[in-house]
Amino acid sequence: MNEVFEKLTLYFQYPFVRYALIVGVLIALCSSLLGVTLVLKRFSFIGDGLSHVAFGAMAIAAVLNLTNEMPLVLVITIVCAVLLLRTGQNAKIKGDAAVAMISVSALAIGYLLMNLFSTSSNLSGDVCSTLFGSTSILTLTQTEVWLCIILSIVVVAIFILFYNKIFAVTFDEDFAKATGTGANAYNLLIAVVIAVIIVLAMNLVGSLLISALVIFPALSAMRIFKSFRSVTLCSASLSVCCALLGILISIVAGTPVGSTIVAIDIVAFGIFSLIGTVFGGIRA
């Protein structure tokens, strides 16, 4: 045990480890806040769809040789989030079909572009790193950390300021519309915020694992708590703890950061499910 603490102490001296911890906590917090709403509205797969879109956008940025790919990826993902919401409201194309259509198309086009135009000598490694997260935590720069901090503050501020509206749209959208709440506008706001979170999470967990950060903490909290506020607070706390533990384990064991965090989330879900089954839910 002493060796573990000594190893962690040694690693904490390096900026890239502190960067990974800061970004991991912020991404986990933001994704868990909106995750409860997405699960309750049965929009869980929108995160998966937009993550594939972000992969395609990163492929386009790589083809264009952009030194800073974040702005392009962010814009494309937000635009697709808006299109996904509009298409999902089309009577001819249902929401789940729209998600499948956009996600598969973006994934295929992204991989095709990387094969046709990539100059990298390790294409399979680049694709694997993008899809499942980097096997190293050396990839985060100070600029990316500050961008993550700013965008995370914006996401949390939006959630707090519009908490009541998000609550109303989540549980009874028709009633919210009847009372004058712009349900479509708030659905659009949720989609845009999710797009921002997904782009932020790409460097940490990869495009294929982002949905786990959104879904698992919310589902775990729902095993025990019943009220929206309690589920949201529990989900945020659990997500942050799982992210911290996952990053620390990845440092000690040398495992991929993203996969380790998701594995911890799965274990937490199992524990919360067991507690909920044995003791029942808490209506608080």
Image (spheres, rainbow, N blue to C red):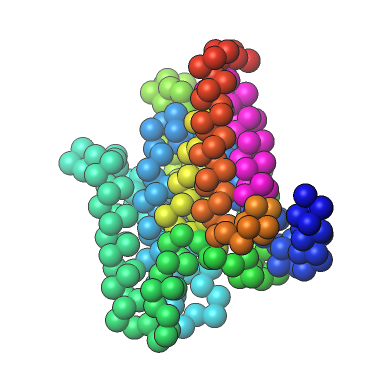
Magenta range: 223-247
x 52%, y 33%: residue: 269
Q: Is residue 207 visible?
A: yes
Counting from the top left corner in percent of width and height, residue 253 is at: 63, 57
Counting from the top left corner in percent of width and height, residue 138 is at: 64, 70
x 57%, y 43%: residue: 264
User: From the viewer's perspective, is residue 50 above or below residue 203?
Assistant: above
User: From the viewer's perspective, is residue 93 above or below residue 273?
Assistant: below
x 81%, y 52%: residue: 2
Nearer to the camera, 260 or 3 = 3
Q: Taking 66 as reference, is 113 left or right? A: left
Residue 244 is one of the magenta-drawn residues: yes
**Residue farthest left in this picture:** 92
Counting from the top left corner in percent of width and height, residue 97 is at: 24, 44
Toward which corner of the image does residue 172 lie, by quadrant? top left
Toward which corner of the image does residue 228 lie, by quadrant? top right
User: From the viewer's perspective, is residue 110 above or below residue 245?
Assistant: below
Residue 97 is one of the magenta-drawn residues: no
Nearer to the camera, 281 or 194 = 281
Q: Quick one: quadrant of the C terminus?
A: top right
x 51%, y 31%: residue: 270
For the image, the number of numbered tags is 0
Nearer to the camera, 3 or 263 = 3
Q: Is residue 180 visible?
A: no
User: From the viewer's perspective, is residue 118 above or below residue 269?
Assistant: below
Give the main secondary structure, helix, strand or loop, of the magenta stretch. Answer: helix
